[in-house]
Amino acid sequence: MATFHFELVSPEKLLFSGEVEAVLVPGLEGQFTVMKDHAPVMTVLKAGVVEVQEAANKVNKLFVRGGFADVAAGALTLLAEHATPLEQFDAAQLAQEIKDAEEDLADAKTEESLKLAAEKLDQLNELKSAIAM
């Protein structure tokens, strides 16, 4: 299968850079798959799982929270606000973070704090679902 260059960058570090066959991207309008010679597009990322297919049998999964996807001639770049490989998550720690986010949502006093707490809880639940896959 034909390959193209893919990079996943977060503020902390470069998480991936290399040739891949396909990448499943969680776009704001829905998931889409990028393959070699994909039409140019730029879109916002939503919280979700990026699946990177390096070779026929090797797939890496990373959780991203926000950012941008830029598909250009022969390349895809994801600039993520936050990105973490799925294998680095601890189920007990995630359960505690969800509990804390639920408490923050219940304690929210302003419209803005309510919105932020609900968004964080949604992202954590999305991660929990992704890990269970």
Image (tube, helix red, strand yellow):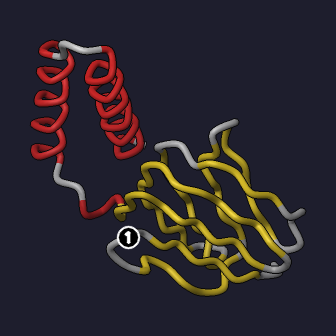
Taking depth in this image into account, of 95 and 45 the one nearest to the observer is 45
Image location (x, y in percent) of residue 19: 66, 85
- Is 125 situated above or below 14? above
Is 48 on the left-hand or right-hand side of 39?
left
Q: Quadrant of the N terminus?
A: bottom right
Q: Residue furthest bottom?
A: 18
Residue position for label 1 = 11
For the point 18% across and 16% down, the residue is 108
Q: Is residue 8 above or below residue 4?
A: above
Q: Position of residue 29 (x, y in %)?
A: 69, 36
Q: Amino acid at mark 1?
A: Pro
Rendered location of residue 64, percent (x, y): 44, 54
Does residue 68 lie above or below 76 as drawn? above
Q: Quadrant of residue 107?
A: top left
Q: How many marks?
A: 1
| In this rendering, position of residue 115 left or right of residue 26 | left
Q: Residue at x 58, y 77 (%)?
A: 7
Helix, strand or loop status at disc 1? loop
Q: Is residue 84 left or right of residue 76?
A: left
- Count neighbours of disc 1 (C-alpha within 10 A) and say few if under 14, some if 14 to 19, many if 20 or more: few
Q: Judge whether 41 appears above or below 72 on screen.
A: above
Assign the C terminus to one quadrant of the image: top left
| Near-viewer residue (75 or 109) | 109
**Quarter-of-image position of residue 122:** top left
Return the x and y of residue 32 as percentages of the image width and height.
72, 49
> Residue at position x 57%, y 49% from top?
45
User: What residue sits 77% from the left and 82% below the top?
Assistant: 3
- Closer-to-camera residue (84/51): 84
Describe residue 43's horizontal placement relative to residue 127 as left or right: right
